[in-house]
Each structure stands twice: as structure tokens, then as C-alpha cells.
Image: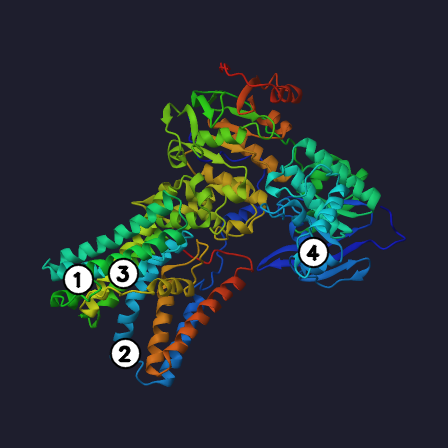
Amino acid sequence: MSTSTSTPRVQVKHITKSFGPVQVLKDVSLELSQGEVLCLAGENGAGKSTLIKILTGAIRRDGGEYLIDGQSVGSPTPAQARELGVGVVYQELSLLPEVSVEENLLMGRIPASKGIVKRKELRARAVSMLERVGLTRVDPTTSISDLPLAKRQMVEIAKVLGANARIIIFDEPTTALSDEDAGHLLQLIQRLKTEEGVAILYVTHRLEEIFEIGDRITVLRDGQFVTTGLTSEFTHDTLIRSMVGRQIEALYPQREHKQFGETLLSVQGLHLQGSPYPISFDVHAGEILGLGGLVGAGRTETVRAIFGADPVDTGKVYVHGTLLHPGSPARAVDVGLGLLTEDRKELGILADLTLRENVTIADLAAVSQFSVISRKKEISLFQKVVPRLRLRYHSSEQTISSLSGGNQQKVLLSRWLATKVRVLLLDEPTKGVDVGAKADIYQIIGDLASQGLGIVVVSSYLPELLGICDRIIVLHDFGVTGELPIEKATEESVLHLASSAPSSTYTHT
Amino acid sequence: MASPSIPPASQQPITAKQQTQAEEPRTPISLGRESGGILVLLIFIAVLMLTTSQFLTLTNLDNLVRQVAVFAILSIGQLFVILTGGIDLSVGSILGLSGGVTALFLVAGVPPPLAILIGLAVGMVGGLINGLLVARFKLPPFIATLGMLGIARGLVLLLTGAKTIAPLPNSFTAIANGFFLGLPSLFWILLLVAIVSAFVLERTIFGRYVYAVGSNSESARLSGVPVNMVLIAVYCISGLLAGLAGVLSSSRLGAGIPTAGTGYELQAIAGAVIGGASLSGAKGRVSGAVIGALIMGMLANGGNLLAIDPFFLQIAIGLLIILAVYFDHLQGRTISFARRPS
């Protein structure tokens, strides 16, 4: 780390960047040396992604210097940046799903003579690349789409390494991974650092990971450099404070008078498609119910089925006593259900539409008369809902795609706040969201429950489930394996249920 | 239960920054996606005024409006479909079919109002079938409407025996050839269609749903938007407007011509795209579609006046489409404010 004698591998100095009127980076500098892991920390919208894109050549900076091995590299194109040894592993992978592992690994440099692929050499090079990341058991001819997500990530890293990357940027690589897979990834990064001397820039929202693998930390806030230092100089609290710029007293809200009212959502004997196990539970007014379980346990499928987004085999869903006929999200919205999806980009935002239009879309009737939308009512609804959310935005007329991920999530949450929602189904509500926005979202969830909404939260992050829920139902293999009141729920007890077999006779109490 | 719509004020302090945000700064909105089209249009007008004395004559403008009206109506219908991310290749054939059917009924002695209604209904049914194929049977719009292109054209050739259907009653031909308040009646019909369409797209819930479906149909569905209904409706509208264009064509020409409208679908798409509509959906406005159709009409008209080889005009239209989309692409790289002030 202390490489005062040698030149840092990467230096950026006084970088500035604006998009139109919005200045996203202001005088940002950082250094990254060989054989170290530098963690770049900051909230959503702090400018981390923009900085990464400048490093990889995806966008051009407006000002400042960019040096690799002490040499100024100008404004490289993505291809030039790759030549210089800059590789990046994004949270959304760049692999082609329908193409085989080996072809993906060498895409763009497939060994060939006179345009005809040399199969053997392709295979051999792919295998040696896979070995480098410890993927010895993956058949190089399988399609990427047949690999589980964690393996795809490893293939992606093998691809970046195979391109002779000496600087690897990881942009939230563990967001979609289970704890176990994330652990493997961190080990691999550790190895790349110590054994191969790769310089690593690591971006994550999981603070635990920063402390686990980071040698140094650089913090950005609102597009500006805040501080940098050895990881040992930070504690959880000081790191959060420098990222957020304010003290977060309690991540999880304290709800004072918990009073559960009438049953708002009643799920009875719901069989997900092809599942032999019935799922039944009630959610009461003022209650936050958690759905726990491992990835693939059927949690997302359950909330989607309740919302009518996917067909079910059998089962009944009552919202405030009204039977909800399955298969139509429109009817679900009408009776007062709202679903915040896990995959914001594909299943949440309307990217070309404005913030205002994204907020009001689920209940346009409320701002209309005779099907004609009143712009005035729309804006006043927007302004009523949005100030709650610490949303960073310029105008209600900017498109939602110009916001960062956490801010998009807040807009989507306000979409449901703008309706007459009685029951909110929240699927991984803080996925990819920074710690400041997380606290805001928990606070909002708590407030909504206090007002008498029924809330269902799906989360893979156990502290979150334990922190905000009143009751936890655990799923495994598309069936319920148990139910825990929050007083009895611990990480161990939830995990235990998450790996038990579901009972086909399970009835809720 | 307390009203759940808005949470109570948070205990956490709201920073000064957020309060200023709440005041809703007005962003200066540029002329929007149509600005390029308007510019091209103005240049055309200037060039034609400078190079020929005939351009600003009443006869020529009258001619121009008549030429443009049918294309513009088709482009508006096409715009509805394009906004949802779809495409309607069948409008030219549907124009021919409903124009031909209307003429057949007129020749058979059916009173014009009824014959017109039948013609419109034919267009709408064609659109309805397109919509059902796309929404219910999940066919790609390109394929569904390509099929309809063939079916409708074949039908009208069969029904008419591939012969021109004439003569049509004077009361019918007067519709597209008449004047109202000193201007061609086709101008008024186009204006009415454009105003109603613009109002529907920009002011109504249905219009907002159209943009939402085009932006991301699955996100829209999960927000409670009745996506299938919206899709069926836009194809019906496109079919209906193609039917209207067919009736007007027959009226203007005084005959039902079975091959009328051949190739118009591409003109309609070109008009919408030159006017700023994006084929991937959710971007575009009625004014743009009309401007796009006007530009293409003026190219043809100006070419006539200046006695330019019509083959060159085809090349010019081709270049125009490519340039329009290319500049749109360039614009898309800067930060996006919705270029669709609704």
C-alpha cells in the first residue's frame, strides 16, 4: 500500500465531468497501486459509476488528468483503455447469454486462421483462463445462460483477466450473489491482489465487504472527493458518516406503538406453478411481514403471484376482504395492492418517461377527470409524495433514467405512495441502494406501517429482515417451512428454516 | 384506517437543498424532438419560395395540402403504434381495402354516409385483428401486420376483380375535393384528426399508457397498466385512420382503385420517424408526424415545381430518414430530459 517509492499504477487528478447542467464530478482524485484493493465508497449518485466510466473510457472527462504508470493517457476509448490493462466487471454482466463460455471468453480475439476458428486452440486457451479463477469444472462449451449467476461472474472475471488486465474495477459484483458465492469472489480478489499483483478498485454497497478486503478507502459524496485513508483508520460509523455526510442514528426505525388491525391481505392455499406446497398467510394493518429464504426459494414468485403478475395453479388472495381474481396486476392495483419489483431496470422504471409520469402512472385516475389528466394535480401529487424521500433530482420533468439506482428506487416507492395502496409487496427494496437511502427507505416502510398499511418485505439480507419486520415467514422450495414472531427470530433460526423441507400440511395460525 | 396515501412528515430534518428542490425549478425545454423537422421544413419553404414563383400560389398550396393530408393521417395512425414500440405495415393495404369497399357499396347504391361508415369499420376491423394478433397471440408486430398487408391487398383485389370502381356519386367526391371557409376540406379533416390525436396522446390517461407501454411494457403491466387493451387500441386507431385515409382517397380520386395505397405504409413510417418518433417506442408527438408528412409532401411537390427527376426525390427521402434518425441518435447521448413536453 505505502508505495511512496514507486509510481501508483493509476492516478486520476482533479477530474470534472458534467452532463448538461448537472455536474456529477467535481475535482475528484484518487490513486491506485499495484497489489492493493482500493474501495470506492459513496452513496448512490455520489459519482462512483461516472468515475468508473471515465477510467474505462466509456465516457470522456471534461477536465483533469488520467495517468497509468505515471504516463498521461489522454482520453482513452474503451478499446484503448483495455489495451492499457484496465478491465471492469460490472454488476450487469457483459457476457452473451446464448454463446458458449469459450467463445465469450475470447470474444473479439477468437483464434482463427483465414477466418476459420481454430477449435482446439480456443478450447485450450479458454480452459487455462478458467483455471485462473478456479473454475475447473465448467465445460467451456456450455452456453452462458446455462450457468448459475455466480459462475457467470467468475467467467466474466476470467475474461477480464485473460485480456491481460492489470487494473480491475469491480462495480458492485456481489449485489446478486448469495453470501457463499460472494465469499468465494472475495477470496479470488484477494488472490489476484497478492499473487498476481493486480491493482483492484472495488465498489460495493456492502460495508462488510469493504472492511473485509479493502486496503484503503476513498470516499466520494455528491461528486466530490471527501476523504481517503487506510481501511484501519475507518470504523463502520465513521465510514457511513463520511459517505452520507450526516449521522445515521438508527438504520432501522423504531416504531413506537405497534398496533395490528384488521386483516388486509389473506393468502389461502396458494400453489405456485408446479409446486405441491400450499402457501397461506395473513398480513394485518400496521404489520410488516418478512419473507425469508435462500435465493430461489420462491419468495419473488410468491409476491408476484399475489400481485397477479404470474399465473398460479390454485389458491385465493383476499385484499381487505375482496377476492382478487388472479392474473391481472391492473385489478390488483385497483383493490389496493402495490408491488415494488426486485429488478428495477427491467420491471420497474419507465425509462423514457419523466419522474412525474413514473410516479403517477399507477393511479392516473386520481389526477384525472373524465380520463383527461390534470397536469396541475399531477405536479401537486408529485410534490406531495416526493419530499419524503430525500430524492436527489433537478426537475420533475427529467427522465427517470437520468437518476442513480437508489434514487430510481425511491421514485418507484413513491409510485405506490401516490396510490390508495393498502398492502405493499416489497421485493428486495434496498437492493443496490446505498446506506443513506437504505435508512430513508426503512424509515418510510416503518411510517407506512404505522399508518395502517400491511407490508410484505422480501429480502436476502437477514439483518434487514430482522431489523424491520414484525413477523417472518420462511420459504424453501416454493413452500413454507415455518413462521417466526420477531421476538424469536434470529439469523440462525431463519437460516435453519430456510434449509428445512416445506410441509405440505403447513397451516398458518 | 388512516389515509395511507401520504406518510406523515419524517422526524428527520429535511435539508435546505431538498426544500429548494420542492419548488420545482422550471427547466427551459427546447423545441423538442420536432425541432429538427421544423428546421428542415422552414428551409424547404425558403428554398421553394426563392427558386420558384409557383410555390406560394393558391392552386399549388391547395394541391400540396391534398397530397399531404392522406399521408399525414396515415402517419398519425402509425405514430400511435410506433409509440408502443410496434409497427404497422398494413396501413397502405387497409387504405386500399376500405377505399375499395366504400366504392363498391356506393356503386351498389348505398347512401354515402353509410358507405363511409362501412369503409371506416373495415379499417378498424383490420386494425383490431392486428391488435389481437400482437396482444393476445404475442406475434411480433412486424409479422402480424406484414400478414395483414398481404391479406387486405388480396381481399380488395378479389372483391373488385382488380378493376377500378367508378363512377362515384358527386355528394361523395365533394368531400375530399370541396372547400370549407376558403380552405380545402381535407385540410380541416387533417387538422381535426391531428388535434384530437394530440389531445388523446398528451392529455388523457390512455395517451399516457401508450407512452408507458412503449417505454417498457412489463414495467407498465406491473404498474397496473392494461397493456393488452392499450396495444389492441393503438392498432385499432391505426386501422381506423387508414380506413379514413382510404375513404378520402376514393373521394378525392372519384373512384375506388384496388391498388391505392401501395407502399404508403413506408411513407407513413417515414413521416413519423422524420418527425422525431423513435421506433423503439415512447418518443414522438403528433405535431412531429404531421411535420414529417409535410416534409415528404413538400419534397414531392417542390420536385414537381422544379422539374427534378422523381428518382432523385426518392433518394432524397431515403437520405432524410437516415439523417433524421442519426441526429436523434446524437441527441440521445447527452443527458436526457424528456423531449416530449406533454
Residue linked to disc 1: B103
In front: label 4 or label 3: 4
Q: Which residue is mark 2?
A: B60
Q: Could you tell me which residue is drawn at 36 percent across and 25 percent down?
A: A322
First in residue order: circle 2 vs circle 3: 2
Amino acid marked by disc 1: Ala
Q: Nearer the viewer, mark 2 or mark 3?
A: 3
Q: Secondary structure at mark 3?
A: helix
Sequence order check, earlier mark of 1 and 3: 3
Q: Give the residue displayed 65% in from the left and 48% down from the top.
A: A46
Q: Are marks 1 and 2 on the same chain?
A: yes
Instruction: Using the numbered discs, state the Cα–Cα distance from disc 1 to disc 3 in whole angstroms.
Output: 12 Å
Q: Residue at x 27, y 64 (%)?
A: B190
Report the amino acid beneath label 3.
Answer: Leu
Residue receiving disc 3 = B95
Neighbor class of circle 3 (other Cα within 10 Å; few <14, some 14-19, many 20+) is many
Q: Residues within 10 Å of mark 2 (few under 14, many from 20)?
A: some
Residue B8, given in percent of the width and then of the height, sits at 49, 34
Residue labelled with disc 4: A109
